[in-house]
Every structure is written in C-alpha cells, then in structure tokens.
Amino acid sequence: MAATQADIVVDGASVSYRRFSRRRRVLSEIDFVARSGEITAIVGPNGAGKTTLFRVLLGFLPVDAGKCLIGGLPPMEYRQRKGIAYQPETIDFPGLWNARDVLGRGVDLSGISTDDRHGAFRKAISRTRFDDATLLRPARRYSKGMKRRLSLAYALIGEPTVVLLDEPFAGLDPPARHALRAEIIGARNRGATVVLASHELGEVERLANRAFVLEDGTIRPGPVLSPGDAPADTILEAEFTGAGE
Amino acid sequence: MIMYMPLSRRVILLVRSRVKALTLMVLAIGIIQWPNLIGGEPSLLAVGLGDIFAILCLALPLVFASGIVSGDFRRGMARLWLQKPIGPVHFYLSRFLEGLLVSLVFALLALGATRLGIAALGQPDEIGRLLGYLPYVLIFACVVFGFSSWISRGSTLVAIGFVAAGALARETGSTHLLGRPWNWLVEALLVPIPAIREFRDFLVGGSDAIWIPSAQILAYSIGWTALGALGVWYTVNKGRLPHAEQS
C-alpha cells in the first residue's frame, strides 16, 4: 500500500541519547507503520522507550540509523510545515496563563486563517469542557486531569493530520475518558493518523486498529492487533505480560 | 500579522509573571542607593538618581529577557509550542523581541521618571548622559538570550558573571593577557564598554563619533542574538532538547 499524506513509516530506526562523547542506545531497529485514518497503539512497560519514540516522531530526536518519515518527510520538516498534535504525559503551563491564554496562543501558532480563528478558538474552548471560572484560573493550578484536557484541546487546534498521545487516559475520570475516546475516534474519522502509547490495555483494545508492543527499546515483530482482528481481551494482556510469546 | 491573542495581552502576561522580580529589583536598588538619596546635596541626589537609572538599565533585561528559551526547554513547554507549524528559531526570536521591547519600554519610563526627579531637584537636565545608558538594555538582553538558548539551568547567572568579568577585564586592562592570537577574540566577546562610552560622549556633546560606536554596539548585539538563534536551532533539531528538559 502506497504511503498516504500522513502515514508514519518507521523502518529500522535506532536512536541514542548522546551526552558529550557518551552514547546510550534507547531504541533499536524499530519497525512500524501507522496509517492515516487508523488508530495505532504502542503498548509496553515503563521505561520501554515510548516517550523517546514520540520524541523521534516529533522530530526532536534524530535517528542514528534507519529512517522515520511522516507523509514522506522527516518528522522535523513535517512538524514545521503542518504541525503535529502531541499530548505529553505530563505538562506544565507558563506562569499566570489561563486556559484562554494558552488556547489563544495555540490559535496564533496553528496557521489558521483570520476568518477561521474565532471558530477554532471556540471549538478549543468547548473541547476543554471547563466552566467560565475555570477558564480564567491560572492553568498551572489545574489538576492533572484538567491539564491533560487543556493540553489535548491545545494540541487539536487546527485539526492536525498526525495526533500523538502519550498515556492519554492516565488520571482521567470516567466522563473525561468518554470524551477523550470521542476525540480520538473523531480524529481517526477525519483521516488523521493517530498514535497512542498506553498502559490501559482495555482502552487500546477498544480503540486501536493495530497495536505494537515496545519492550526494552525494541518493537516485537508484527502488530499484535491488526485491522480486522476480532476484539479479544486476552491478546494484549498476554503479549504485555509475556505470556503470548 | 493579526494575532488572536494580541501582543498587548502577551506583554501584560510577561510583565505580570515577572512582577515579583521587578519589585525585588527596585527594592534592592533603592536599598543600595539609600545612603546617596537621603540628606545629600541636590547635585549629589541628581547623580544618585542617574545611577539608579543606570542600574535599572542593567537589570531590566535580566527580568524580562532571562529564561525565555532555557525556562521553556527545562519545563518541557517547548514541546507545547513547537508542535505547531512554526520554526523554532522564528518563534523564540519573536519571544525574545517581546522581552526586549518590554525592557526598553520600562527603561524609557524610568528615564522619564529620572528626568522628572532631577528637574524637581532644580538640577540641569542630563538627557544625553541618561540616554547613553540605553545600549546596556539592548546588549544585556542579547547576551542573556544567547546564554539562555545554550545553558538550561543558571543561564542568567552565567550571563551576569560573563558581563561582570568582561567589565572587570576592561577596567583592569587585562584583556590582552591571553596573548596576540586571542586578543581579537577577547575583544569581540567582551561587552563593548568603550563603544558605549563613546556613544554616551556623543550624546553629551563630547565627541563627534556616533557611527562607529553605534555599529559596534549593534554588531555585538546581533552577534549574541545570532548565537542564541543557533542555540535554539541546534537544541530543537539536533537532539539536545531531551537533555535540556532533564537538566
């Protein structure tokens, strides 16, 4: 299948953290493909390299060997041209900025035409589901779940075609989970390439079209879930715990 | 370009978030200068007010331009801003220019207040001498930006140390200690205090030279800004960002 506009292709990518002359390899010969209009999940234990993989996909960390392309472009170039929605696992917001300031800045930076700015801003505000008083409180004082809602609303401004979510369900209550699922499915339905890293196997099985297991900096060959697989509660758990080997 | 979040709102946020530092700085300068300000001759008081303005010119960039890059890198906020379709250098240069603009506006407000104070004391207006301190705002802001993009923690302190060491080296005439091959480099790196003095001399009517010192001041500022821009580019595009976040 030919690569479409926002397909992610990672082929034999190895990544190291370098500190002066020291080099520590954190990802080894990673192979995976994430398609437009699909949700791809990366599951794996803590320290497996999921966040590092997202840094590579964002273009903040170059690969030592192999290749990583988004829509046929290096991630850095793709990000600077089209933007990549990214919700990190933890997030901080500047000084006394409230949600409106953060989202207003997001609208400024998203390259949205002047006519569409107000609509994009209103949509981002509604995505947070904050009341008026909360919108005006400094974002730094929000709870973890509220910060995550704000960072997701910020990331989705401009409806980017690549969406990366790092542990998106962590710290969310049931209504927030429900809303997040709707956002993820909405992004998929508009043709975005969605990649999510999660420990929450139930959520992964419910949402993902394909899933890969990342362990010790390496992705196990082949997806453990593929399009067309019947949902099976045990597949991922078995792979995750090693019982599937 | 029309901004959804207007420049004025961003500037207000920048000022509000630094209000504590600004208040502490004004208090510190007041305490330091207090002996000169009480019970002195009007002429001495006027000199004291001018000195306070000079110190403000040195300190304002430290309040408004420090940590613009390093703070974002360290707290992981670079990932927030730079996921959008923007160039990192363009983004951080515009943030720096906002900080520089706010520093210059505060310096001009302080200049007005100083002139009013001197006029109230019945002393002659020293607008030339006071304007001669403004290049410090530009130069310090650029040096702080330059260090901020390369050093994630303590960049402001390093910038202060660098400027202080440079001033000391020039005052003690020890800029040539490294020997001939390095003299040009030392001269190029250290804050161009002689050029700033020449610039001030021109403003008070003691010199005809304005273009050469102005060009030196501008070149030095542009050089440090370019170094800062290079630091942003290297950090974001060459894999230094994760280290900056962890430091």
Image (spheres, coloured by chain):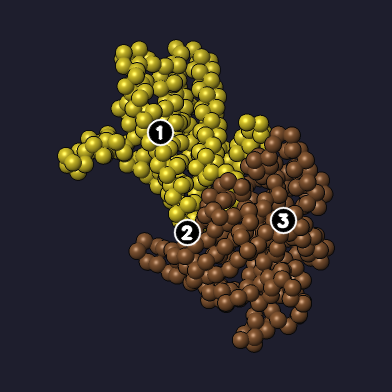
Specify the amino acid type for callout 1. Answer: Ile
Residue B92 picture location, percent across and down: 52, 42
Residues packed near mark 2 inside 10 Å, few (<14), some (14 to 19) or many (20 plus): many
Q: Nearer the viewer, residue B185 or B234?
A: B234
* Residue A176 can be seen, yes or no: no
Q: Could you give the CA–CA distance between mark 1 and mark 2, rounded to whole angstroms?
A: 29 Å
* Residue B69 can be seen, yes or no: yes
Residue B226 picture location, percent across and down: 41, 39
Q: Are marks 3 and 1 in contact (CB under 8 Å)?
A: no
Q: Could you give the CA–CA distance between mark 2 and mark 3, rounded to whole angstroms?
A: 27 Å
- Residue at left offset 80%, top offset 60%: A182
Q: Nearer the viewer, residue A109 or B182?
A: A109
Residue of label 2: A62
Q: Report the mark closest to the observer, 1 or 2.
A: 2
Q: Nearer the viewer, residue A138 or A168?
A: A168
* Tag 2 secondary structure: loop
Q: Quadrant of residue B175?
A: top left
Residue B68 picture location, percent across and down: 52, 44
- Residue at left offset 65%, top offset 62%: A35
Q: Report the mark closest to the observer, 2 or 3.
A: 3
> Residue under mark 2: which chain is it in?
A
Residues packed near mark 1 inside 10 Å, few (<14), some (14 to 19) or many (20 plus): some
Specify the amino acid type for callout 3. Answer: Gly
> Residue A191 — which label?
3
Q: Which chain is yellow?
A: B
Residue of label 1: B222
Look at the image and give the colour of chain A: brown
Q: Quadrant of residue B54?
A: top left
- Residue at left offset 49%, top offset 55%: B241
